Image (cartoon, rainbow, N blue to C red):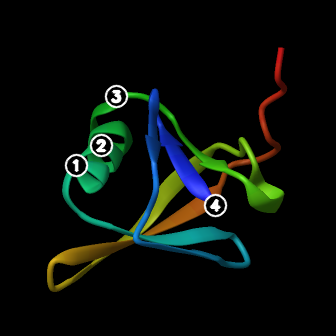
Amino acid sequence: MDLIIGSRHVTPDVITRTREGVEAVLRGEALLSLLDSAFHGAGTIEVLGGDLDRCPMEVTGIAMQGGATRVTLTALGAARRLM
């Protein structure tokens, strides 16, 4: 699984499925893109692949760990339809 943040395709260092969504380990530009989207309205956050494919996500947790950050993303509902 990867993330689509705004119009960017982001491959997390690690991504793990949880009961409510996913946990992703991000660093550098990937983390900055996610933070801009979550806190400044600079695009949407969606999962790419797996059973949550194209599902809109919301940031519900952030934990700093050395040079990386673990972000918890919770699913906001059904996947968006392709046109």
Identity, as a three-letter code, of the amino acid under mark 1? Glu
Q: Nearer the viewer, residue 14 or 76?
A: 14
Circle 2/circle 3 CB separation < 8 Å: yes
Q: How many marks on residues?
A: 4
Question: Which is nearer the N-term, disc 2 or disc 3?
Answer: 2
Q: Which residue is mark 4?
A: 1
In percent of width and height, residue 55 lies at 71, 45
Identity, as a three-letter code, of the amino acid under mark 4? Met
Identity, as a three-letter code, of the amino acid under mark 3? Ala
In the image, residue 24 above or below residue 7 = below
Screen quadrant of the N terminus: bottom right
Task: Look at 15% across and 85% down and name the residue there.
Answer: 66
In the image, residue 28 above or below residue 29 = below
In percent of width and height, residue 37 lies at 36, 38
Q: Secondary structure at mark 3?
A: loop
| Tag of residue 42 | 3
Question: Which is nearer the N-term, disc 1 or disc 4?
Answer: 4
